[in-house]
Amino acid sequence: MSTAILTGQPVPGSSIEADLRSLGFDVRHAADAGDAETLLARVPGGERVAVVDARFVGHTHALRLGLTDPRFPLAAVPGAVTAQPAARPALTRALAREVTPGGGTALAVDSVADRAVTALHADGAAVHHPELGRLVAVVPADPQARNEARQAVAAVDDEAVRLKSAVKARDGFFTTFFISPYSRYLARWCARRGLTPNQVTTASLLTALIAAGCAATGTRGGFVAAGVLLIASFVLDCTDGQLARYSLQYSTLGAWLDATFDRAKEYAYYAGLALGAARGGDDVWALALGAMVLQTCRHVVDFSFNEANHDATANTSPTAALSDRLDSVGWTVWLRRMIVLPIGERWAMIAVLTAATTPRITLYALLVGCAFAAAYTTAGRLLRSVTRRATRTDRAAQALADLADSGPLTEGLARLFARPARRLPGIAAPAVALVGGLAVVATAALTDFGGPWPVVGALCYVLTSALAVARPLKGALDWLVPPFFRAAEYGTVLALAARADARGALPAAFGLVAAVAYHHYDTVYRIRGDAGAPPRRLVRAVGGQEGRTLLVAVLAALLTAAQFKAALTAVAVLVAVVVLAESIRFWVTAHKDGAPAVHDEGEPA
């Protein structure tokens, strides 16, 4: 239970007390700042507390936005301020200043809550002020102003505003026009029945897994059912985020589940298509694995670029300016959102092609579409990077180093290469990462299975990986290093499994890449949640990206094709168990320990 302290004399006919109770607050009354300070001290330390002016007039949703959002330790709207347990001392100090003679703050409207907010700002506290838009939140100074405020409240339907704000601000064409017009009402239906976003997220996952199972039957009826269920899963996927925004049910665990399950759903569906095709005598496992590799590398490009530039200083670019100008032209906005093939367009395409064509055609179309989208987005980011003058921070360099996923081999060699690496040109890090990656993938793909050349290529790759990360990744194009590493590792596994030409080798490779990709996505979500990268002991336990690449190359050289398949399966299971156990332990513990709630909008839908 949260506690709201109403300050000042009650106003006849005011609904503020009922509104606060509807939001889950236990309401107490204080005559002035001194009484408010006394009541605040009596509230248990583990509870959220709010100070609200009894004269407040406004929409209930304005209060909800200002007083119940779990992401912000301190938040305020006119006439109301709230503090989560961690920020209670700051609010206590602010109220104490109002009680101390000569320490108060003079405002045009004598509101204890507003004076406390002013004191918080004076103390340097970070107070969140939600964007209210058309919603009303005021403390009227006289009866006439109160009547005008009530008329303004009556003129705006806060439920309509709440529903509209439940939809993600930036979505793709398909989601905006074919999903959100009704999924927002499904989100409201879920909220009124007490369902949580995590429950809806789980339902979306289960629906997608059933869709994958239908695709795996290899029948036309199964493919049609799979397409329908995949769209249903996507509707639920949109609903969980809209429910979180509608009811402000944000959590660290929820953000992780939403992001993780999105990847699990999509990649499980690729596997279902491959199994269904196999039932019809068509082996498309290489295409399914290629689609997963390409899609994961696309995401790593997004993650790396954003982490490299999110706190860069002097962040200017003619390319960015051109993009902003294009955004002012209505039709170009939707076109640019569609050609990057966001999850909505991507899943719609997959669903329709699954129902109407074959798994092979579906995966070919997916590969072509994702390749074009990847080329478009990467080209734009390259232009932004080479035309901007930005100074990247130590935090950005550390984030890129964490995304690189370097293991003990690279760590040791990087220390040896540190001095010569400082004398290399700025382009050196991504250049050597690219050359090393091309070398290992080319030797794996173009030489006979069981030969020594993939091992030679992998050894060269270990050296180039170490050289690439031997100095802080602060160069203009250093954000390309993690994507090059992902492409090299995943591409080597794909190439060697394809060259093995053994029944089951490609499905085993699919499992290994899926397990490693989970580890890499988990790293991203921890960094985004300000939780830091996974512990170094975990990275070392699974070998690092260069260690796994070398291991797979050595296994391919020493084992027969059948043995190689078994070894890939064993490595996949081992990596999956280790990374899943640590990931689940971390996120569940963070949730139980009350980690700050986050809400990552993630990939545009």
Image: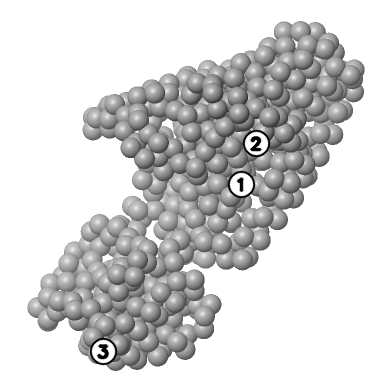
Q: In this view, does 41 lie to the left or right of 133?
A: right
Residue drawn at x 42%, y 85% is 40
Residue drawn at x 39%, y 47% is 168
> Of discs 3 and 2, which sits in the foreground?
3
Q: Earlier in the sequence, mark 1 or mark 2?
A: 2
Q: What element carries label 1?
A: loop
Quadrant in which residue 328 is drawn? top left
Quadrant in which residue 575 is drawn? top right
Residue 436 percent across, percent down from the top left? 65, 18
Residue 533 - label: 1
Q: In this view, does 508 lie to the left or right of 464?
A: right
**Amino acid tagged 2:** Asp
Quarter of the figure that contains the C terminus: top left
Q: Name the residue under label 2.
A: 405
Q: What element carries label 3?
A: loop
Check if mark 3's residue and mark 1's residue have beta carbons within 8 Å: no
Q: Return the residue nearer the eye: 272 or 72.
A: 72
